[in-house]
Amino acid sequence: MFAIAIDGPAGAGKSSVAKAAAKALGFTYVDTGALYRTIALYMLENHICLEDSAAVVAALPDVEIALEYGPEGQRTLLGGRDVSQAIRTQEVSMAASKWVAHVPEVRRFLVGLQRELAQKAHVVMDGRDIGTVILPEAQLKVFLTASPEARARRRTLQLEEAGEPADFDQVLREVVQRDQQDMDQLAKRAPDVVELDTTGLGFSQVVETLTGLARERIMEYNKEKR
Ligand code: DC
C-alpha cells in the first residue's frame, strides 16, 4: 500500500488539502484528529474529569471507536453512533488538544487502529505524528505549515461559512494557544519530511503541489516494485 502522511499544526489546512489530494489520487482520506476528538467526547459525555489522566486511562477500554469510509468520506462512530458532527464543537476541540492528546496511553491505544487503516487502502492520513510514529514507512511525508495569522484567517472564514461568525483576534489567540498546547509537544518533523509552507498560497496551489509530489513518488514506487 502507498501511504501519504501529512502532519502539521492546527489550522494549516491539513484536512481540506489532504481530503482534496486523496480525492484527486483515488486514495482514502483518514482524519486521525477525529479519533482524539471522539475520546474527548466520550470523556465529556460520561463526566470523566479530563484533568485526571488516570480516570481517562481507566475509561479507555470502554471507548468503542470505528472509522468508516464511503462516498461521503470518513464517518466516525462511537459505540456504533455516528459522532462525525458532534466531535466538531469548540468544547471537544479544546478537550482533545489540551488533555486527551497528551496522555501517552491514549496515543498508544490509537496506534493499531491507524496502522490497520493504512494496511487496507492507499491513504492520505493527516495528524501530528503520522510520519514519525504511526507510519514511519510512509512513502511520502509532508509537514504543512502556515503563519498563525494565515491560519487564523482561514479558521475565521470557515467559522463564518459554517454560520458561526467569529472575531479574528479571538481566533488568532486560540490558534496561538493551541500551538502551545499541541505543536511543540506533538507535531514533529520526520527526518525525510517535505516541508510545505502554505502562507500566501491558494488552496488549489497547495493541493497541486501535494498531488504533484505524490505522483512523482508513486511512479518511483511502482518502478521499484517492478
Ligand atoms: O486535527 P484536529 O484538530 O482534528 O485534532 C484534534 C486534536 O487531536 C488536536 O488538538 C491534536 C490531536 N491530534 C493528535 O495529537 N495526533 C493526531 N495524529 C491527530 C490529532
Image (cartoon, rainbow, N blue to C red):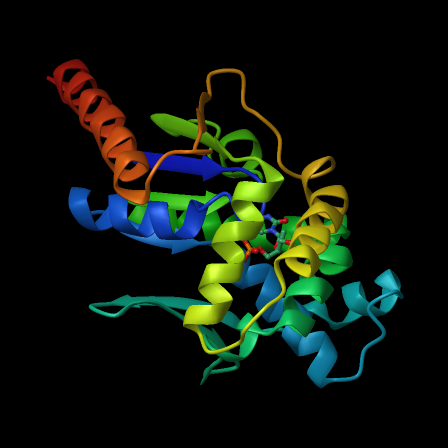
Q: Quadrant for residue 128, please give it.
A: top right
* Residue sticking out furthest to the left: 226
Q: Position of residue 16 (x, y in %)?
A: 37, 52
Q: Is residue 81 left or right of residue 64?
A: left
* On screen, residue 170 above or below 48: above
Which one is nearer the viewer's eye here, 114 or 160?
A: 160
* On screen, residue 12 above or below 64: above
Which one is nearer the viewer's eye here, 149 or 23?
A: 149
Q: Is residue 121 visible?
A: no
Q: Is residue 20 visible?
A: yes
Quarter of the image where the C terminus is located: top left
Q: Position of residue 109 (x, y in %)?
A: 63, 55
Q: Quadrant for residue 93, please give it.
A: bottom right
What count of labels does the image hold? Answer: 0
Residue located at (42% from left, 51% from top): 15
Q: Quadrant for residue 87, please give it.
A: bottom right
Q: Position of residue 197 (x, y in %)?
A: 46, 28
Q: Position of residue 41 (x, y in %)?
A: 64, 75
Residue located at (44% from left, 74% from top): 162
Residue located at (47% from left, 50% from top): 114
Residue located at (46% from left, 61% from top): 157
Quarter of the image where the N terminus is located: top left
Q: Is residue 19 left or right of residue 52?
A: left
